[in-house]
Image (tube, rainbow, N blue to C red):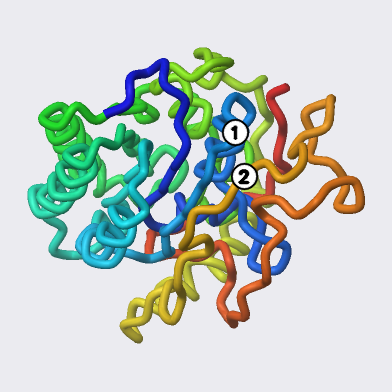
């Protein structure tokens, strides 16, 4: 296993929609997400870094184990992130122990091969999705299992669940299931700090400025739009036994260099397309008739504008 001071040269991400990047971009212009952002952070300090992302939206922990572990091992990463279990939370027969059995197998195989592995804990979904309150005991059990399983294998845990800012709606996309661009940025920063990467710190834990929330008729209208735009389609897919990941493969199945050209301008924004060579989210669109922000999770929405935190 590489020491914290050893530059990482091969980063492989395993997981579901959060790792794929849903909520940060779209299927037309390309998804970014916390794994892409973490890869970019790594590459700024080790330009030779190569990165693969095997995640597919809608996947359960068992599917991530069955479909992504062997390809990940074949790529021989020295760094891997494994994020799994949220889709399982929403299944009627959720079993935290079963999810952690799959995490245990993935953590064990990757660390045995010499990779440093990192994961995250799951925030309380009810803080942004009130109808998810019955899931609180499941989230608690899953996070305890993630910590215990990670401890057995020396896996790094970014404790995204412990900080109040994780419940700020501005860190979540309109479906209130997936992180927003700002949320993905915070997850990447949490992992960078947990991994003790150069340039990382605790600012990802800081609260955002106060916000005025919708009230009265405006709030009712927001919830009705969410129900029509997100809850209805999600329920319909469940009734049909479909997944948002049906027919999909990973967006970046092979290792490729990250930094063909600078990915950020001096002010922290990405350069315009004509100012740089293709980067992580300049990839072929994926044809699909489903809303790109939907996944196998329990949704809620709002119409607040995204903000940045500097």
Residue 310 appears in the rendering: yes
Extreme residue toward the right, this view: 274
Circle 2: element type: loop
Labels 1 & 2 near each other (Cβ < 8 A): yes
Circle 1: element type: helix
Whichever of labels 1 and 2 marks the residue nearer the N terminus, that label is 1
Q: Is residue 11 left or right of residue 241?
A: right
The image shows residue 201, relative to residue 39, as above or below, that is above
Residue holding disc 1: 43
Q: Is residue 117 left or right of residue 264?
A: left
Pinpoint residue 120: horizontal percent, then vertical percent: 34, 35
Residue shown at 76% from the left, 42% from the top = 261
Residue 301 appears in the rendering: no
Residue holding disc 2: 258
Q: Is residue 260 left or right of residue 226?
A: right
Which class describes the residues within 10 Å of circle 2: few (<14), some (14-19), or many (20+)?
many
Q: Quadrant of residue 74?
A: bottom left
């Amino acid at each position: 296993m590489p020491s914290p001071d050893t530059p990482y040269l091969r980063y492989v991400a395993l997981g579901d929609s959060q790792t794929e990047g849903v909520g940060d971009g779209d299927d037309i212009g390309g998804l970014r997400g916390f794994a892409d952002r973490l890869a970019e952070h790594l590459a700024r300090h080790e330009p030779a870094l190569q990165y693969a992302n095997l995640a597919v939206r809608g996947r359960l922990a068992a599917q991530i184990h069955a479909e992504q572990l062997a390809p990940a091992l074949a790529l021989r990463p020295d760094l891997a992130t494994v994020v799994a279990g949220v889709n399982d939370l929403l299944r009627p027969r959720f079993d935290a122990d079963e999810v952690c059995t799959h995490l245990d197998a993935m953590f064990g195989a990757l660390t045995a091969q010499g990779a440093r592995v990192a994961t995250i804990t799951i925030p309380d979904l009810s803080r942004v999705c009130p109808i998810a309150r019955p899931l609180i005991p499941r989230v608690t059990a899953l996070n305890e299992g993630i910590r215990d399983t990670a401890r057995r294998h020396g896996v790094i845990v970014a404790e995204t669940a412990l900080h109040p800012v994780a419940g700020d709606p501005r860190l979540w996309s309109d479906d209130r299931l997936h992180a927003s661009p700002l949320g993905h940025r915070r997850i990447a920063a949490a992992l960078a700090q947990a991994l003790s990467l150069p340039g990382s710190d605790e600012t990802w834990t800081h609260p955002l400025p106060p916000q005025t929330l919708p009230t009265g008729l405006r709030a009712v209208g927001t919830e009705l739009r969410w129900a029509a735009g997100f809850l209805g389609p999600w329920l319909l897919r469940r009734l049909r036994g479909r997944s948002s990941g049906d027919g999909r493969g990973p967006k970046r199945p092979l290792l490729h260099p990250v930094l063909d050209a600078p990915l950020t301008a001096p002010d922290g924004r990405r350069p315009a397309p004509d100012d740089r060579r293709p980067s992580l989210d300049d990839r072929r669109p994926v044809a699909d008739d489903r809303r790109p922000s939907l996944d196998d999770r329990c949704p809620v929405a709002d119409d607040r504008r995204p903000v940045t935190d500097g």
